[in-house]
Amino acid sequence: MNSVHNSGKMRGAGRFLMPVLAAVLLFSCGKKAEVIPPAKMARIYADMFLVDQWIVTKNLLRQTDTMQVYEPVLRKYGYTVADYRKSLDVYMGDPERMYRIVGKSKSLLEKRVKELEIAEREAERRDTLSRDAGAAPRQKVDTLSHPKRSHGKNRGKVRIHS
């Protein structure tokens, strides 16, 4: 008789918990995944490449879950991993479009390299002038955070600028 009484309580609790669980699942899933526009996708890929290079230079490849590393990049642009996956499915089904996106990413990275080369030359020029004046030499340009360098509590963290 006790087990019948307890099972009645469980059914009552189940009636209460099922709508709560359904609401939690509904709201935790958030918005429906959307396709990232090609221009933003190109910028996202460029930033992902920079993050990949940082991981390789820090020898963290074996310890890194790339989607966890890429998630902040996606958030920076206002997207989720689900949006990225949906976009990847769409763009992989259209090779010409995907080729253009990757080409735009490459152009963005090449532009960034040129900016860094100019900054490095300018820093070397200032070093030469400083040395001639007796000042201390500069530090090497940080390719991930230059020209907006990280200072204070954010020092050492990867910053990606759009």
Image: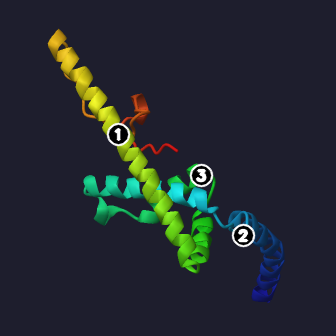
What percent of the width, then of the height, locates residue 18?
Answer: 79, 75
Q: Earlier in the sequence, mark 3 or mark 1?
A: 3
Pointer 2 residue: 25
Can residue 134 be seen here? The reply is: no
Residue lying farthest top? Answer: 133
What percent of the width, then of the height, locates residue 148?
Answer: 44, 33
Classify mark 3: residues with Cα within 10 Å, few (<14), some (14-19) or many (20+): some
* Direction from residue 91 to residue 56 in the image, left or right: left
**Residue 73 or residue 24, whichever sits in front:** 73
Amino acid at pointer 3: Tyr
What percent of the width, then of the height, locates residue 65?
Answer: 40, 65
Classify mark 2: residues with Cα within 10 Å, few (<14), some (14-19) or many (20+): few
Q: Earlier in the sequence, mark 1 or mark 2?
A: 2
Pointer 1 residue: 116
Q: Nearer the viewer, mark 3 or mark 1?
A: 1
Circle 1 — which element? Answer: helix
Classify mark 1: residues with Cα within 10 Å, few (<14), some (14-19) or many (20+): some
**Residue 114 or residue 50, whichever sits in front:** 114
* Direction from residue 22 to residue 89 in the image, left or right: left
Circle 2 — which element? Answer: helix
Pointer 3 residue: 77
Please name the residue shown 33% across and 55% down the image: 53
Amino acid at pointer 2: Leu
| Relative height, residue 17 to residue 79 (above, below) | below
What percent of the width, then of the height, locates residue 153?
Answer: 42, 32
Q: Earlier in the sequence, mark 2 or mark 3?
A: 2
Circle 3 — which element? Answer: loop
**Residue 102 or residue 75, whichever sits in front:** 102
